[in-house]
Image (tube, rainbow, N blue to C red):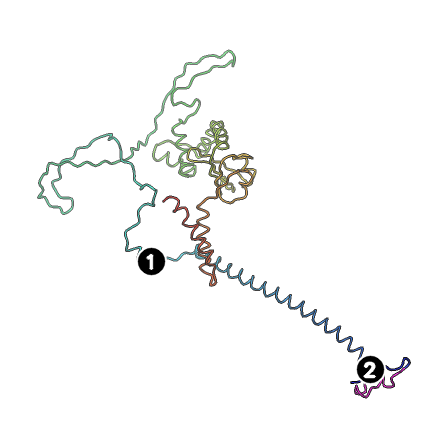
Amino acid sequence: MPRGTYPPYDFRCPYTHHCPYLDGLSTTWVFEEYQRAGEVYQEHLRIIDILNTRLDESLKRVRMLEKENTELKAKNTALHRRQFKANRATPSENDQERSSAKKRGAPIGHPGWSRPAPTKADRTVHLGAPSICPHCGSDNLLTTGQVSEHLQEDIVLRPRTIVTRYVHEEAYCGRCRRSVVQGGEDELLHAPIGPVAKSTAIYLRYRIGMPYRKVQEVFKDLFGLSFVAASALGFDRQAVAKGAAIYEDLREKIKASAVIHADETSWRNDGLGHYAWYAGNPDLAFFHIDRHRSTEVARSILGSRFEGILVTDRYAAYNGANAPARQVCLAHLIRQAKEITRELALIEDRDKVAEAFCADIATFPRKLVR
């Protein structure tokens, strides 16, 4: 096929502006539109790529939001079920099997709970054989000659007070330039109420949790000792003043302990919100009531560098103690693992691996005591 020849240098096509082969269109305009179409095509491709990227991101975010929505619904349902428990749970097959089986005793590794029997008897009461059966009322009874014993503990209430009159011989102190006396046994100088009554009032207030007015009623009704409620508050303040040195010594012993368990809870004092802090172990127990729940309070109890093992929950205030060894409370871990397991059970497409992991954590402490 012969090759086409190039037109002369000064050739001008007479159909530049009206070509019959282009339906009368201008060749210059057609070529410009051809070049513009290429640019527009590339621009459309770029826009399509941007829209595809945005669509992928939107779909990814929608899937993430759907997953978060499902998890939040499961948490909300689990929280609602914890707050509003059913009156009676529907028994399952496993529950019926367990109910028909032998009742479970004490956990493995734990001794059974029983009250220690008295080692001696303060008095002995001899009773003759009955003449009438206490079960059927029959009087046809024969004496067997055997003896059975029964130990019973009870308390003796003596609703009266003991008033002791102390007669002091005075002496004069040349240094103090005043008369002085010595206190007798079980005597609080210049105190109208004795130490046993004061310590009992403090016990009822802080160990039993009675208000001051209830403590006043107990003393008046059971022991015949009358005082105003403000006196019970004064007992506390006197005990605080006398026990301040012991209190600070106990704080120092807590800081030097090898293992300490620490926790805090809300506490109302004079109608204001406070926090009761605890730090201790099987040998020591330290309590501190403070308005704040901050790192500074934790440091005041444990020190800025606690060298032992610190067992707490995951509250951030205890990080200020800078303990080199931390142990998270196992009860919190078990409780949270059970809560997560209940939440996972409410999700249709739940994670089997996470569910098995939470189940292992919930049973981990039980495996340790076997």
Quadrant in the picture for residue 50: bottom right
- Which sits in the foreground, 98 or 150? 98
**Is residue 14 magenta-colored?**
yes
Stretch in magenta: 11-27
Taking the spot 49% from the left edge, 28% from the top edge, the residue there is 249
The quadrant of the image that shows the C terminus is top left
User: Mark 1 is on which residue type?
Assistant: Asn
- Which sits in the foreground, 139 or 68? 68
Residue 167 in the image, given as x and y percentages of width and height: 39, 17
In the displayed image of the protein, which residue is found farthest to the front? 1
Relative placement, left or right, of 133 versus 101 is left
The residue at which mark 2 appears reads as 27
Relative placement, left or right, of 160 versus 53 is left
User: Mark 2 is on which residue type?
Assistant: Thr
In the displayed image of the protein, which residue is found farthest to the top? 174
**Is residue 165 magenta-colored?**
no
Q: Callout 1 environment at 10 Å: few (<14), some (14 to 19), or many (20+)?
A: few
Residue 216 in the image, given as x and y percentages of width and height: 40, 35
